[in-house]
Image (cartoon, helix red, strand yellow):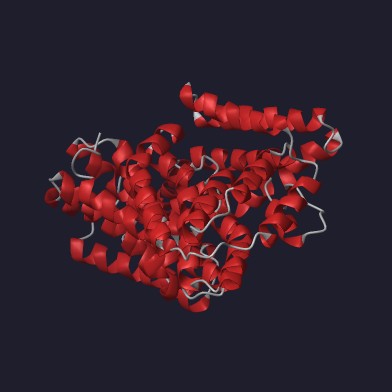
Amino acid sequence: MFPIKPKHHPPLTEAIIFFLILIGLISYFIIAIGAPPHVPIILAIFLLIVYGFMKKIAFTELQEGMTEGARAGMGAIFLFLLIGILISSWIVSGTIPSLINVGFTLIGGTWFYAVVFAATAIIGVSMGSSLTTTATIGVAFIGMSEALDASMAITAGAIVSGAFFGDKMSPLSDTTNLASTIVGVDLFGHIKHISLTTIPAFIISFILFALLSPNESMPMGTGDNYQMALEATGLIHWSSWIPLLVIILCTILKTPAFLALGLSSVVATFIAGIRDVLPWSEIWNVWFNGYTATTDFQPVNDLLTKGGINSMLFTISLVIVALGFGGLLFVTGIIPTILLSLQTKLRKTRTIILSTAATAIGVNVSIGEQYLSIMLTGETFKGVYEKAGLSKKSLSRTLEDAGTVINPLVPWSVCGVFIADVLGVPVLTYLPFAFFCLLSPIITMVFGGRKLKN
């Protein structure tokens, strides 16, 4: 919970009504108008300031609440900066191209949907971005599905499932870093803990996709085009695996995430420099602006043109304004009042887990923003988990299981709108087949209150 003392204690009914008004405002702007989430959150901040004035709270106290709220996310912000650097350095060192190449190598045989799911998951982990994975490899798999005359709905479900498995399990993922930082859990400890629910969901999903797969062998032409273009970049090399091994070693040694990501980025950068991939001056520039691919195959250019500090500024600015919004919710007493009511009712572990998951899902459905789902739910329930004696990892795991993976299942959400557009498959069409996204919250709600709470 934010270390912010409320300056007002509104009645529970008033707190709930005003909170719903704020959520309604944010939802309207994001869903109906299609505005960037920053805009309605800033408008909500203005409303909260007006509310604070009405309750005779000094502006200096409101400003301090915003500042303290934003300060709570500084750890995540520095990690996001490093993620941008890591992605760009992993591309110039050939690490990400090598991982993607391996993903295409797996494609073959008759288990088409299962292979699409597995390959997308591997590439998703290497990219750390579900939307990027969907917009690049996902589009290629949709084309393969058409050539096979396979189900577009099941193929899209497999793509979304694999992409969001990667989004949950990758140390490069902004949502994974956000969930661990908001709760105050080490990144790699968080990833290890969410595997308790994520791996079973992956295995069950793989089996379901295998059972649904057609018997025909898939055409390899599209995958070959990707692999030839990846080889043509000159980035793939045996040394490309060293930065990945550094991350694995740091995970084993339980090195703090900031140091692990920084070390891997530096190693990757020097590998690129030693191999003379780019002039040294351009390699360091890639840290800020990202890498730009120039192959003859545009899909690979789209796949590898990314990374850099610049690419993370949207996320960073959203985190700042959202946490500032959260700080105001605390200083005006709105969230503390609701929390106090929750804390008197939430006693049992299962009830707490179910309430956390329901809140994360509810924010996704009402607002359509996965970042806000993680941040608002995380800040709301930290005190509840602490009072109940539950570990912080249980909270961070539930945020991912019921927050991150639900967003692509909401037709008006940021992820839902994007995915439906790039794949050409409506959300409600692929939703029944997005097995991993459906199973993750179910598993955490069924088993979260038992053996997975430590």
Name the foreground residue: 173 vs 242.
242
Q: Position of residue 279 (x, y in %)?
A: 87, 36
Seen from the viewer's position, the closer of residues 394 and 197 is 197
Residue 59 spot, x, y in % from top left: 43, 54
Task: Tell me where residue 111 appears, x and y as whole percent.
Answer: 48, 57
Q: Is residue 88 left or right of residue 206?
A: right
Residue 331 visible at all: no
Task: Name the residue furthest top.
Answer: 253
Residue 209 visible? The answer is: yes
Percent x, y of residue 104: 62, 51
Where residue 453 sits, quadrant-wise, is: top left
Residue that sits furthest to the right in the current view: 279
**Residue 295 horizontal side relative to residue 308, left or right:** right
Residue 83: name its quadrant.
top right
Q: Which residue is found at the position 42% from the left and 54% from the top?
A: 404
Question: Which residue sits at x=40%, y=69%?
Answer: 431
For the image shown, how many numbered marks are present on the structure?
A: 0
Q: Residue 144, relative to residue 336: is it above or below?
A: below
Q: Nearer the viewer, residue 450 or 220?
A: 220
Residue at horizontal 52 percent and vertical 46 percent from the top:
173
Quadrant of image for the C terminus: top left
Name the quadrant of the N terminus.
top left
Judged from this view, the residue extending furthest toward the bottom is 32
Image-based side of 281 in relation to 326, left or right: right
Q: Nearer the viewer, residue 156 or 75?
A: 156
